Amino acid sequence: MSKSLDLAQLRRDYKQAELLENSIHADPLQQFKHWFQEALEAEVIEPNAMCLSTVLDQKPHSRVVLLKGLEPNGFVFFTNYASHKGQQLLQNPNVALNFLWLELERQVRINGKASPIAAQDSDAYFYSRPFESQVGAIVSQQSHVLASREELEQAMSLALQTYSPETIKRPEHWGGYLVVPESIEFWQGRSSRLHDRLHYELQADQSWKISRLSP
């Protein structure tokens, strides 16, 4: 019989860095860019992976997607508009994003609203992807039930014979979303669980109010 997991004894003391008011940018998007660059330099695995949470009928739904653009006013990701997340966003655009960079003992929490980006911007990203990924976006009826793995592979094989890099077009059911933040929290792990939490909240005049939150 395997030894039972003693989860209560799993702990780690965070001592890598601190997060102080006199060292942050007044604009949280600029602060995010700074932290993201440090994640790249630290060779964090998939630093652009983020948990996207949606809410439908008062029930939360979460999944990990990839950040593919950082605009002056928000965060961009791409997906199938007919997927579960796409249908949930259609009914309720309020979302939460979460980045976790364990190697740096950091996380970033974002709350805001998602809206589809312009078709030409979705086109630009779609055609920058590898050809097989373009075909995959056409083949996958994301979130729909499959009879088997073979069904998906057969559809992909047929599509690779049908399309070419010269003839493929972005499907209308696939594209990007921009999440415009209303609040952003930067979390830095500290010793004895006395973590640093700096919270940015968007004000009516479009300025950002910065508050320190208790851990």
Image (cartoon, helix red, strand yellow):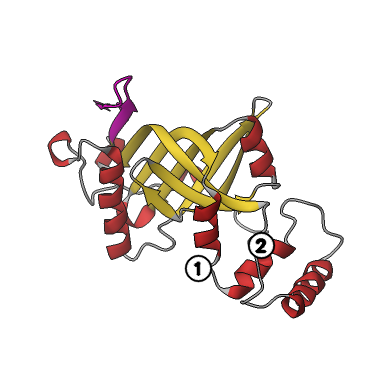
Where are the magenta residues, as a range? 197-215
Residue at (32% x, 50% y) in the render? 105
Residue 209 in the magenta stretch? The answer is: yes
Q: Nearer the viewer, residue 191 or 91?
A: 91
Residue 60 vs residue 142: left or right? left
Q: Amino acid at mark 1?
A: Ser
Please state which of residues 114 and 102 is positioned toward the viewer in this rendering: 114
Q: Nearer the viewer, residue 78 or 163?
A: 163
Mark on residue 128? 1
- Dot 2 lies on which element? helix
Tell me the quadrant of the picture where the C terminus can be found: top left
Q: Is residue 72 visible?
A: yes
- Residue at disc 1, secondary structure: loop
Query: Outermost residue, top direction?
Result: 204
Q: Which residue is mark 2?
A: 137
The residue under the point 34% across, 57% down is 103
Residue 56: image location, x then y, percent: 66, 30
Q: Amino acid at mark 2?
A: Ala
View extreme (right): residue: 147
Q: Is residue 169 above or below residue 33?
A: below
Q: Quick one: label 2, few (<14), some, or many (20+) residues within 10 Å?
A: some
CB contact under 8 Å: marks 2 and 1: no
- Mark yes or no: residue 6 visible: no
